[in-house]
Image (spheres, helix red, strand yellow):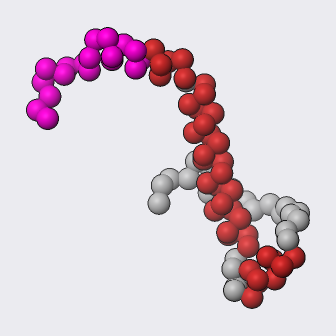
Amino acid sequence: MSTPHFDASAPKKAANLSINSDLLRQAKELHINLSQSMEEHLANLVREAKQKQWLAENAEFIAAYNKRIEKEGMPLEQYRTF
């Protein structure tokens, strides 16, 4: 499991959610911890959104770097053993 990108020790805060009643019933029958499940899924959504945001913010640099590597090759490539 990767390190969370949020303060896992931050206090819990109540939130109101609207959930499909049949899905909620089935989750309760299966003893699924709704708070834990929602927090884990939300953490994944936040991580993915932050990755996309970082890639978008750094797209120009990444493109320039890739162009330089295509033109000049990898730094210290002559020392690679593979």
Q: Residue at x 81, y 83 (%)?
A: 25
Is 45 located above or below residue 24 in the figure?
above
| Residue at far bottom of view | 29
Classified by dominant secondary structure, the portion drawn in magenta counts as helix
Is residue 74 covered in magenta?
yes
Q: Is residue 75 left or right of residue 10?
A: left
> Image quadrant of residue 27?
bottom right
Q: Is residue 50 left or right of residue 60?
A: right
Count of number-bearing discs: 0
Is 40 located above or below residue 26 in the figure?
above
| Residue at far front of view | 70
Q: Nearer the viewer, residue 45 or 4?
A: 45
Give the image location of residue 18, x and y in percent. Answer: 88, 65
> Image quadrant of residue 74?
top left
Give the image location of residue 56, x and y in percent. Answer: 60, 28
Give the image location of residue 12, x and y in percent. Answer: 75, 62
> Image quadrant of residue 34?
bottom right
Q: Nearer the viewer, residue 7 or 39?
A: 39
Say if residue 7 shows up in the picture: no
Quadrant holding the C terminus: top left
Q: Residue at x 73, y 60 (%)?
A: 11
Is 65 located above or below residue 8 in the figure?
above
Give the image location of residue 63, x and y in percent. Answer: 47, 19
Which portion, as a residue range, is magenta? 65-82
Is residue 73 covered in magenta?
yes
Q: Residue at x 56, y 53 (%)?
A: 4
Q: Residue at x 55, y 23 (%)?
A: 59
Is 78 located above or below residue 18 in the figure?
above
Say if residue 46 shows up in the picture: yes
